[in-house]
Amino acid sequence: MEESRLVISQKLPYSYRAMIRLAENIYCWNAFNEEKNVNFNGYLIACGDQTLVVDPPAHAVSDELFLEKKLGRTPTLAVVTNRHHLRDVQWWMERFAIPLAMHESETNDYEFEVARPLRAGERVAPGCTVVSLPGKTEGEIGLYLEANGGSLLVGDALIADPFGALRFVPEAKIQDRGRLIASLQALRGLSFQRLLPGDGEPLLTGAKETVVKYLDGLDAGG
């Protein structure tokens, strides 16, 4: 009994949450980062015959079982939105023998190959387009998913924390704040219901209104 209590009380470096469905063909799993006090999110996106793994944090055996038994899908491409979100991507690349895609400006500092350099406006998969969001890093990207009212993955360009609110990463981590703000203005022209951040809590309804309100505050000097 005493031994059982000791095992249960062991402190893990992160709090892991299994893969969950956010919308049709969109799944999320995350690991809570105690140092930054925020969830690190990874996404599984099914686009036609393609299955994308985006910004993957720590994984579990249950993720493989979920893919195989529940979804019946195998990842075909790993996408990383910026160089700070490599996270557990190498495991996915090696386990499923899939290539890595990042913006062409983010491909110079790694020991493993970026097989698919991405550009703004490029179609990564059916209904999935690259959105350029430089500022935090030179090659920060988002992914715009057209289906089901629209979803927008934004990497570190916007942090959804606390729940229902938006903010930037700490100032020291932003290369060019003015450029980041300017790049985010392009989001005004997209139609989307959901915002899927690399860090924080996904917004599943009313996301565009939340983004526009945040950008309006920045324009006003907020």
Image (cartoon, rainbow, N blue to C red):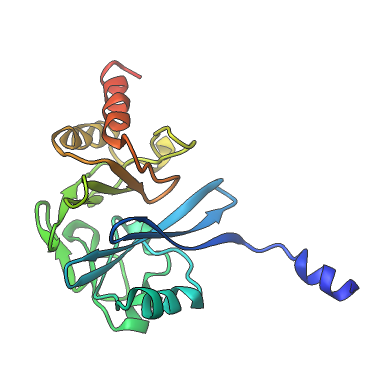
Q: Residue at 42% across / 74% down in the picture? A: 66
Q: Classify residue 63 by image quadrant.
A: bottom left
Q: Residue at 56% across / 45% down in the picture? A: 37
- Measured as percent of width and height from the top left, residue 105 is found at 19, 57
- Measured as percent of width and height from the top left, residue 130 is found at 16, 54
Hey, which residue is sitting farthest top in the picture?
Answer: 220
Rendered view: 222 above or below 93: above
Rendered view: 55 above or below 174: below
- Measured as percent of width and height from the top left, residue 109 is found at 30, 65
Q: Residue at 9% across / 57% down in the picture? A: 122
**Considering depth in this image, is 42 or 183 the residue closer to the camera?**
42
Q: How many marks?
A: 0
Q: Quadrant of the N terminus?
A: bottom right
Q: Quadrant of the C terminus?
A: top left
- Measured as percent of width and height from the top left, residue 68 is found at 37, 80
Side of 191 relative to 155 (left or right): left
**Considering depth in this image, is 110 or 128 the residue closer to the camera?**
128
**Considering depth in this image, is 218 or 75 the residue closer to the camera?**
75
Rendered view: 161 above or below 56: above
